[in-house]
Image (tube, rainbow, N blue to C red):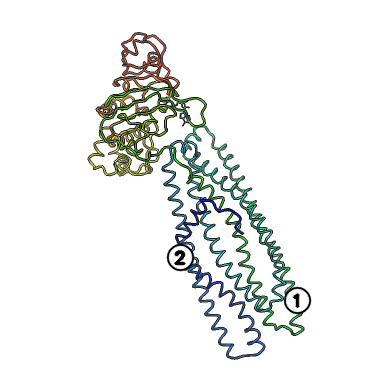
Amino acid sequence: MILFSLKPRHKILIGMIRDNWTRLFAAMGCMLVIAATTSATAFLVKPVLDDIFFNKDQTMLTLIPLAVILIYFLRGAATYGQEYLMNYVGEGIIRRLRNMLYNHIQDLDLAFFQKERTGVLMSRITNDVNIIKSMVSTSVTSMLRDAFTIAGLTGVIFYRDWKMAAFAFLILPLAFYPIVEFGRRVRRVSTGCQQAMAEMSSFLHETLSGNKIVKAFGRENDEKERFAKKTLDLFRLEMKGVVANALSSPVMEFLAGIGIAFIIWYGGSRVISGTSTPGTFFSFMAAVLMLYDPVKKLSKVNNKIQQGLAATDRVFDILERESDIQDPPTPVEFRNRPHHVRFENVSLRYDGEETRALKGIDLDAAPGEVLALVGMSGGGKTSLVNLIPRFYDVSEGRILIDQIDIRRASVASLRRQIAIVTQDTILFDHSVRYNIAYGKPNAAEEEVIAAAKAAYAFDFIQHLPRGFDTRIGELGNRLSGGQKQRICIARALLKDAPILILDEATSALDTESEMLVQKALENLMRGRTTFVIAHRLSTISVADRIMVLVDGKVVEEGTHQTLLSRRGEYFKLYQMQFSNDPEADLSVSERETPAAVTSD
Ligand SMILES: Nc1ncnc2c1ncn2[C@@H]1O[C@H](COP(=O)(O)OP(=O)(O)O)[C@@H](O)[C@H]1O
Ligand SMILES: [Mg+2]
């Protein structure tokens, strides 16, 4: 009945089941007891009828009720044991699979996260894993308990009247065809259902977390409609599954009815002619009727297995995916000290993109040098700095830190050298203290406070309901963009890494707090190799060198003054972006040029 071939992924799953063999063994014992008690009940019908009712045997009248009590006691105990043990195994497998999935997903490269939607990944860890559990516990239970019960009852049937039994079993193969056919249909529908489910959780994730935008653009009703369409799709698919599932029982029941009709006719005629006793007949009949339940359950096993296999495929598709960013076999460990960073003819083409985002970049940053990257949005600034911690790997060329190709180093030691502040202020739902100490979990209280002070975050943190213990989630959206950004800066300050990447790290700050934070950043940059991307001159002017990126190429390089006097690309940018900055040093004429466009 198991219609599939074993792949490595299935072997892993079976291995997980087998790891629980002691529990499975005990559960199997319970199942044997359950099967035996069911068969014994059917068996006892004959002595009840023939010995008690017809022969009026007094000893049997006391013995049989006692036997029945014992049988049902054993049955109850075994049922409890089997339920407990099988669920223990099933829930244990859920736990292991969830952890495996989460651990694996955490280690996948950033490109994977850009491709997959968060909601879909969440659905893998929550829904699909549950379906696999259901397959494991139902199928193991059914295949053992129900198969044992069927075997026992079949034994009773043949023992009572083998000729009649042989006839009854002739029609059994007929019952198998619908089981197989329904199973196939269920598997197809189940895959569709789970995809629709993943689709829905992804949709929920987006529209609930991005609810401010939904409201701002007045799209509530459209989103309601889109959601209603998704629930309708899911409804239709689920109903298809229900039809396939629900049809399998009536079809089997009808076949069973034919069998029973035959038994009544044939068995009855044998009782009438005196070749059989009423006890034999009813015992036989009881066993046949009791067969119905385990056979029905066993017939659903195929459906469960088909659903489970579809879920297993989705889960293992993720588990078998390898990260593109990995440690080499013998990784070099970077040590914590000022670093020299060098790009040699580096190009980057994102997966599936036609054009290169970076084209032949050469760059050399001495230990402690502050390098500014400027250029219009889309020029490749973020792409360039993302290569340093190996968020992506170069497509051509190489990046050297202290003359070592970063692909030869351990990823963990590479990333320990780098502190990053980005434009997106991502904080976790935990205390403010936890967030600041994210890169150094064992930091002392004084260090956390010092970092917060240096990032000019201390004052507003103190005014939060519970200071450093305030949970970010508890604040909801009460932190302003600038406040979040200052917590992020404190987080980077505390990490105290020799390479610093500031990707529009001050974009959310107002001019006043930027001036304050600017001083903190200047302190921070001292002695560190720094890559700073900013669209405000105050941040750029402290740089030792400025590189202008246009279309993934470095078009100009030099100090602020030399670049201005060259009157090229930087000069243009400067006019467009910086000249309305009150901090801007407008020593170069051209005051009269219209200049108010702020890009980025
Ligand atoms: N993950 C990505 N996948 C595909 N293309 C990307 C990805 N990230 C950025 N790009 C593209 O690379 C180019 C450079 O983007 P980016 O480095 O973000 O520029 P900048 O930071 O200067 O604004 C853009 O054309 C952008 O669309
Ligand atoms: Mg950018």
Indicate the amino acid at tag 1: Tyr
Q: In x, y percent, where is residue 391? A: 40, 34
Q: Nearer the viewer, residue 34 or 387?
A: 387
Q: Is mark 2 within 8 Å of ligand 1?
A: no
Q: Residues within 10 Å of mark 1 (few under 14, many from 20)?
A: few
State the image coordinates of residue 63 (x, y, percent, origin top left): 56, 86
Tell me the SS state at disc 2: helix
User: Which residue occupies the foreground of this view, 33 or 54?
Assistant: 33
Quarter holding the N terminus is bottom right
| Res. 458 in view | no
Number of marks? 2
Ligand 2 shown in quarter? top left
Residue 548 appears at what percent x and percent y?
Answer: 38, 19
Q: Is residue 83 left or right of residue 540?
A: right
**Dots 2, 1 in contact, CB < 8 A:** no
Q: What is the x, y in percent for residue 333?
A: 30, 38
Q: For mark 2, does the 10 Å Cα neighbourhood hold few (<14), some (14 to 19), or many (20 or more) residues?
A: some
The residue that disc 1 covers is: 266
Residue 23, numbered label: 2
Q: Is mark 1 within 8 Å of ligand 1?
A: no
Foreground of the two, 453 or 526: 526
Residue at x 47% of width, y 37% of height:
210
Residue at x 67%, y 88% (from the top left corner): 54
Q: Is residue 367 above or below residue 449?
A: above
Q: What's the residue type where badge 2 is placed?
A: Arg
Disc ID at residue 560: none
- In which quadrant of the rendered image does the C terminus lie? top left
The first of marks 2 and 1 along the sequence is 2
The relative height of residue 78 versus residue 413 in the rendered view (above or below) is below
